[in-house]
Amino acid sequence: MLIQARNVHYHMGATPILTGVDFDLGAGEFVGLIGANGAGKSTLLKVIGGLWQASSGQIDLLGRPLSGYRTREIARLIAHVPQSTRVEFAFSAREIVLMGRSPHLGRFQMESALDRQIADDALRTTDAFHLADRLVMTLSGGEQQRIFIARALAQEPRILLLDEPTSNLDIKHQVDVLALAQSLAHERGLGVVAAIHNLEHAARFCDRLVLMTCGTMVADGKPEAVLTPERLRQAFQIEAQIYRDPFTGNMALSVR
């Protein structure tokens, strides 16, 4: 198991954000975090990824307490792609991706030919090698998202955490990014966790769904077991009918 979290709580001041969360992630698995805004999805990603320290509970990374790892060690194992990343300077796509090699370099150490090869391989994996010499600020939202995922892959992580990776993307790029995340799990053996708002996309691409509400997990399992009218009513206050799309065969929702 890559990550095991048990009875995890996270408070921001006196406000509870996560309450008693249990979460597992295995190699080769693509897990989708779903739930309404404010359910705790982004916070869970930050806590299990070591960016924020849990208020209480136990999180193990590769069988060792997460708290026992140094920051650089975590960065070699876990890569984050946040909801939005602003680039203030005129960096090329290749320069951005090379930043992912930082956990593997010593202080003031320059990238080697191997580091550059790893960065180029990450660009190829995300189908973005043709963008390598373009300034990131000139790229579309979908192209930038591929660059930031490539930067994460350049870390050579075991775990990839994606916080709403399809926000502000058109439908084609949403599908492309989630298909890429699925292939990284299934073909490369990464453990991938993504916070996803589109429930139909989550059901189509993810192996497991974790439904959260008010900082707690209310369901964890296969998409067809999690996406039920009762649970959607509880989490989203909607009336929904679940069915199989006759054209694609994928799960679909009809909401009234």
Image (tube, rainbow, N blue to C red):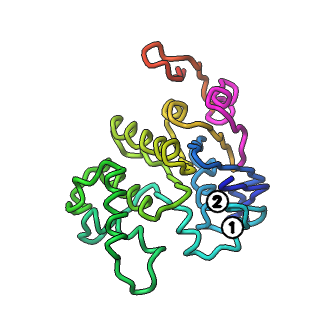
Q: Residue at x 67, y 43 (%)?
A: 213
Query: Mark 2 Cα within 10 Å, few/some/many (few <14, many 20+)?
Result: many
Residue 66's mark? 1
Callout 2, which amino acid?
Answer: Ile
Above or below 4: residue 237: above
Q: What residue range appears in magenta?
A: 216-236
Q: Which residue is mark 2?
A: 48
Above or below 173: residue 238: above
Q: Position of residue 120 (x, y in %)?
A: 31, 60
Secondary structure beneath label 1: helix
Towards the viewer: 35 or 152: 152
Residue 175 forms part of the magenta stretch: no
Q: Position of residue 169 (x, y in %)?
A: 35, 43
Above or below 138: residue 177: above
Towards the viewer: 244 or 254: 244
N-terminal of the pair, mark 1 or mark 2, is 2
Secondary structure beneath label 2: helix
Between the C-alphas of marks 1 and 2, the distance is 8 Å
Q: Residue at x 77, y 62 (%)?
A: 58
Q: Residue furthest bottom?
A: 108
Q: Are marks 1 and 2 in contact (CB under 8 Å)?
A: yes
Q: Residue at x 29, y 52 (%)?
A: 128
- Horizontal placement of 197 versus 17: left or right? left
Q: Position of residue 27 (x, y in %)?
A: 60, 49
Q: Residue at x 37, y 63 (%)?
A: 118
